[in-house]
Amino acid sequence: MNSTLIAIFEILIGVGLIGFWIYFFLVENKNPEKSKVYLGFERSFPVPDLGWATPSLLIAAIGLLSEQPYGIFFTITSGSALLFLGLLDISFNIQNGGYTTNIGDTIMNLFINLVCIIFGPLFMIFAWGLF
């Protein structure tokens, strides 16, 4: 895999995180059918997602595209952030029936979780190989 392709994935995931939070606060957060446990859990994620994972992904992409060393560092850190967030979300979903709700929520949860646990390690392994 080359740096440009990794950077494109980083940008797409970063933009996807922003899009998810716009959707969450405009739709999910106002849904009276969502449990307090689910909403409390989800409301704890904007800071790490938007305050660390998304900026790290975008900085990594800029660094890789401009062939700067910080691109490698931020690709590793953003990969680690994605893996952590994905595993935390999977743990919550397993314990709280997140994969047994309606089919739309299940598909969205699985998609987000798979993106995190696939691309997180992929980014870390790719960047480590650039050293």
Image (spheres, helix red, strand yellow):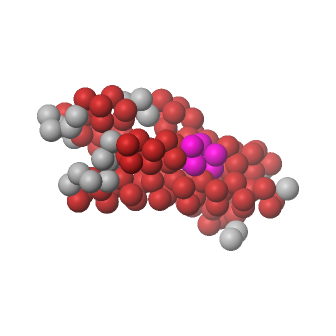
Can you tell which quarter of the image residue 89 is in? top left
> Can you say whether 21 is above or below 99 in the image?
above
* Left or right of 46 in this view: 119: right
Can you tell which quarter of the image residue 25 is in? top left
> Can you say whether 89 is above or below 43 in the image?
below
The percent coordinates of residue 7 (x first, y second) are 62, 58
* Main SS class of the magenta portion in the image: helix
Q: Nearer the viewer, residue 24 or 101?
A: 101
Please name the residue shown 37% across and 32% down the image. Answer: 41
Q: Nearer the viewer, residue 16 or 112?
A: 112
The percent coordinates of residue 61 (x first, y second) are 63, 52
User: Which corner quadrant holds the N terminus?
Assistant: bottom right
The percent coordinates of residue 93 (x first, y second) are 37, 46
Residue 63 in magenta stretch: no
Please name the residue shown 47% across and 59% down the image. Answer: 114
* Left or right of 130 in this view: 78: left
> Can you say whether 67 is above or below 87 in the image?
below
Q: Nearer the viewer, residue 40 or 54?
A: 40
Q: Total number of numbered labels? A: 0
The percent coordinates of residue 78 (x first, y second) are 62, 45
Residue extending farthest right: 131
Q: Is residue 66 visible?
A: no
Bounds of the magenta span? 78-84
User: Which corner quadrant holds the C terminus?
Assistant: bottom right
Q: Is residue 42 visible?
A: yes
